[in-house]
Image (cartoon, rainbow, N blue to C red):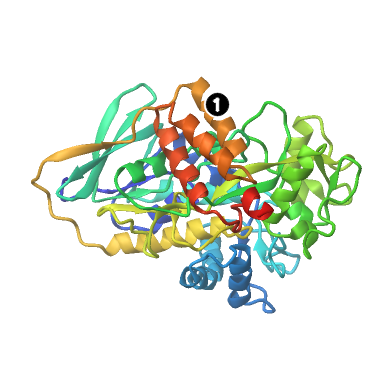
Amino acid sequence: MRADAPVLIVGAGVAGLATALAAAPRPVRLLCRTHDGVGSASALAQGGIAAAIDPADHPAAHARDTLVAGAHHNDATAVRWLTDEAPRTVAWLVAQGVAFDREEDGALRLGREGGHGVPRIVHAGGDATGAAMVQALRAQAQRASHIQWRGGVDVEALLWRDGRVVGLRTRDERGREEIHDAARVVLATGGIGSLFARTSNPPGADGAGLALGLAAGAAARDLEFVQFHPTALDLPHRQSLPLVTEALRGAGARLRDARGHPVMDGVHPLGDLAPRDVVARRVWQACQEGGVWLDATTVTDWPYRFPTVLAACLEHGIDPRKAPIPVTPAAHFHMGGLSIDLDGDTAVPGLHAVGEVACNGVHGANRLASNSLLEGVACGRQLGARLATLPWAARGQGAMRWIERGPSLDSGTLAMLRQLMWSAAGPQRDAATLREALRQCGLWHGWQTRLAEALLLAALRRTESLGAHCRRDALAA
């Protein structure tokens, strides 16, 4: 490791970008599979950022809603920190050039989503908040003299020396390898939705960073808690599905079954705006009974408020202004990940994590709507500012070794693994199905199966239902 080695940040969604910007003036090299962060889950995010900005609201109320949604499995200290930090995070994003939607008097327009007691969600471009944030932060990063971009590369291994991570190895689109020295390595690689047969995530959200961190000896936390968004556009024979934002239900849209009956009647006091795990399980059940549709025909001002959903529906021959939208649950967000503290440190020296790949306990057993972009930016800023002040590590003299992520599954086996995870580790689970899935995983060899096995084992060990982890056998008992 050179004395002037940069901080290496793997991933260019909002968490990686915020970390990189906040690390100034320390040199940063931003590594991502795609070029300039295009295709990240952050860029696809339709929800906004939750923050207690309205004078009638308060961070303590935001914290209560976060704890309720998380089934009180959350780390209360992390929740208080995040909700207190939320208004400052929004202000920082405005300073970075994110053009949030505003009322005629210039005040930020606040929407309401599932699990929130009051309107506190800020959006940009209606349902295009993630894209607006990535675009603004990417522009800032490209202008920043301390940040170097390296797109089109995949991180295959971490370099270990003298008891710490001191670098990594990448492979580019042409198969060429490159070794990068590092002062510190930050994993900001996103979630695991692409391990499921139906997901709102892009193909790159496959858990590769999580698998690499686990291979390096980082501890896992809460791997069993996978959030399924209740409303993705139900397209046959597709894995990555367009999201149908929860904000539509906040604007009055209703979930209905094949007979036109409201799906959520009598299920939860908040009805269609109940926490996501509650709605996802009910939609999952109703899909087995004939299908579910989101009736948004009463919603107005589509081109301004919901342009992304409108375009996705029209592309597939559905006009949501005139006809209900067919929807299905889809793997959306991983509350678990590499165990970190509030500073973003894993238990492995030299290795940090931020965003969806990480878990500091803030989301508990089920993430509250619009807390994900908030967490990515707030925790990224926190980690980056700390990296800027950490002392340089002494140059090591010991033997070096590589910590490999390992070989990938072939495309056919990966498709079977995705279907297996959808059936066994979807919105409803039971011991027998989880055990059979583990047996099947033992027949396949790849880093994806090791990650799937870790999640399945965590789901099997938690025998009670909690938040997004629903055990049918526990309910039956």
Q: Residue at x 76, y 38 (%)?
A: 288
Q: Who's the residue at 64% across and 46% down the image?
A: 427
Q: Residue shown at 65%/49% (left/top)?
A: 472
Counting every numbered tag in the picture gives: 1
Q: Quadrant of the N terminus?
A: top left
Instruction: Write down the residue under mark 1.
Output: 416
Residue type pointed to by label 1: Met
Q: Quadrant of residue 19?
A: bottom left
How many other residues sit within 10 Å of disc 1, few (<14), some (14-19) or many (≥20)?
A: some
Q: Position of residue 434 (x, y in %)?
A: 54, 40
Q: Residue furthest front?
A: 477
User: Is any atom of residue 72 visible in this view?
Assistant: yes
Image quadrant in which the C terminus is located: bottom right
Residue 5 is left or right of residue 388, and the answer is left
Place of residue 360 in the rendered image (x, y in percent of width and height, measured from the top left): 44, 61
Residue 279 image offset from top left, x and y in percent: 72, 53
Determine the residue positioned at 67% across, 38% down: 242
The front one of 279 and 83 is: 279
Q: Residue 52: in sight, yes or no?
A: no
x%, y% of residue 380?
43, 58
Of residues 63 and 45, which is closer to you in this image? 63
Work out whether 131 lies above or below 234: below
Q: Is residue 370 left or right of residue 358?
A: right
Towards the viewer: 398 or 147: 398
Q: What SS does tag 1 mark? A: helix
Q: Is residue 347 above or below residue 157?
A: below
